[in-house]
Amino acid sequence: MDADEKKQEGLNPKAGAQKVDKSSAKKVKNNVRKLRMERMVSKAELARRAGLSTLTLDRVERGMPCRMDTKRKILEALGLGPQDRVKVFGDSEED
């Protein structure tokens, strides 16, 4: 099986016969989008203020995991402090 066939089968050609599972990352509900909308700020503007890409911000809003530094940048861009972390990202901190 060559690399193209492995891609079609959902296998990672560089990792042998391992399945590529994009759904393995655990999604966690957060309030980033809600707070952004309350402040009437676009996703692009919040990403610019936080120094993040819009793709990263979109992933965070969809509940994908992110680094602590990314969370800190989002909090600061929303005008919040570290004490508001639980209000925005919930209390399930596994970082």
Image (tube, rainbow, N blue to C red):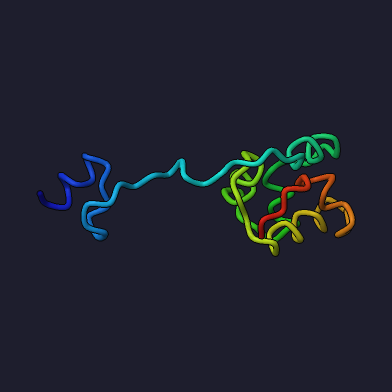
Quadrant where the C terminus sits is bottom right
- Residue 53: x and y in percent read 60, 54
User: Which is nearer the eye, 16 or 53?
Assistant: 16
- Residue 21: x and y in percent read 39, 44
Q: Is residue 18 found left or right of 83 in the rendered image?
A: left
Task: Write the residue at 67% across / 56% down.
Answer: 94
Q: Is residue 22 found left or right of 59 in the rendered image?
A: left
User: Which is nearer the eye, 3 or 25?
Assistant: 25
Hey, which quadrant is residue 35 in on the image?
top right
- Residue 40: x and y in percent read 82, 37
User: Which is nearer the eye, 55 or 3?
Assistant: 3
Q: Is residue 61 found left or right of 4 in the rendered image?
A: right
Residue at the left extreme, as displayed: 1
Task: Write the residue at 72% across / 56% down.
Answer: 71
Hey, which quadrant is residue 29 in on the image?
top right
Task: Write the residue at 78% across / 40% down.
Answer: 36
Task: Write the residue at 43% across / 44% down.
Answer: 22
- Residue 86: x and y in percent read 82, 49
User: Which is nearer the eye, 4 or 39?
Assistant: 4
Count every numbered label the image shows and give the total: 0
